[in-house]
């Protein structure tokens, strides 16, 4: 049975090298990697190589709930795209250089616990935070 894929995307007014750096560098990840203002990402690490591990802690600011997101890279082409595996699922992030901007397209395997619309909205919200952070820095 093939896995249902969900895609979210945005276009950022910044060159691809900056967008890549802000998306993959832990010092930036902690500033945008959450879906809702009541949440934050207090820690992140990223070993950006094939077989390398990405980890991010996501938690409610009031401390009521949190979880660790961990993924392993299976494919990387710098400033173009990468694929990682997490919990038996995969996600690919593409960085498409346009004139004076970069399109970021994230395609990921849906999970079965939450409705598709909810999953898409959550991932899109994180991507919207990323856009806002990157364009304002």
Image (cartoon, helix red, strand yellow):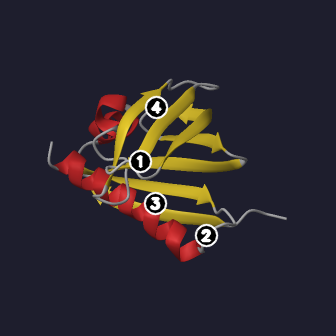
* Sequence-first disc among 3 and 4: 4
* Sequence-first disc among 1 and 3: 1
Return the residue at label 3: 123
Q: Which of marks 3 and 4 is in front?
A: 3
Contact flag, marks 2 and 4 (Cβ < 8 Å): no
Real-space Cα separation, disc 4 to disc 1, in angstroms: 29 Å
Quadrant assignment for the C terminus: top left
* Residue 5 tag number: none
* Residue 59 tag number: 1
Real-space Cα separation, disc 1 to disc 2, in angstroms: 18 Å
Q: Which of marks 1 and 3 is in front?
A: 1
Real-space Cα separation, disc 3 to disc 4, in angstroms: 22 Å
Q: Which of marks 4 and 1 is in front?
A: 1
Real-space Cα separation, disc 1 to disc 3, in angstroms: 15 Å
Return the residue at label 4: 78
Question: Circle 4 — which element?
Answer: loop
Return the residue at label 2: 114
* Sequence-first disc among 3 and 2: 2
């Amino acid at each position: 049975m093939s896995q249902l894929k969900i895609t979210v995307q945005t276009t950022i007014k910044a060159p691809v090298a900056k967008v890549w750096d802000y998306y993959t560098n832990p010092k930036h990840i902690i500033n945008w990697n959450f879906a809702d203002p009541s949440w934050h990402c207090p820690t992140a690490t990223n070993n950006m190589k094939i077989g390398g591990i990405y980890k991010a802690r996501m938690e409610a600011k009031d401390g009521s709930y949190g979880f660790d997101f961990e993924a392993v890279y299976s494919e990387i082409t710098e400033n173009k795209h990468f694929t990682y595996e997490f919990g038996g699922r995969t996600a690919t992030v593409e960085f498409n250089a346009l004139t004076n901007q970069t399109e970021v397209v994230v395609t990921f395997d849906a999970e079965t616990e939450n409705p598709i619309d909810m999953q898409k909205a959550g991932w899109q919200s994180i991507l919207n935070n990323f856009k806002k952070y990157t364009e304002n820095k």
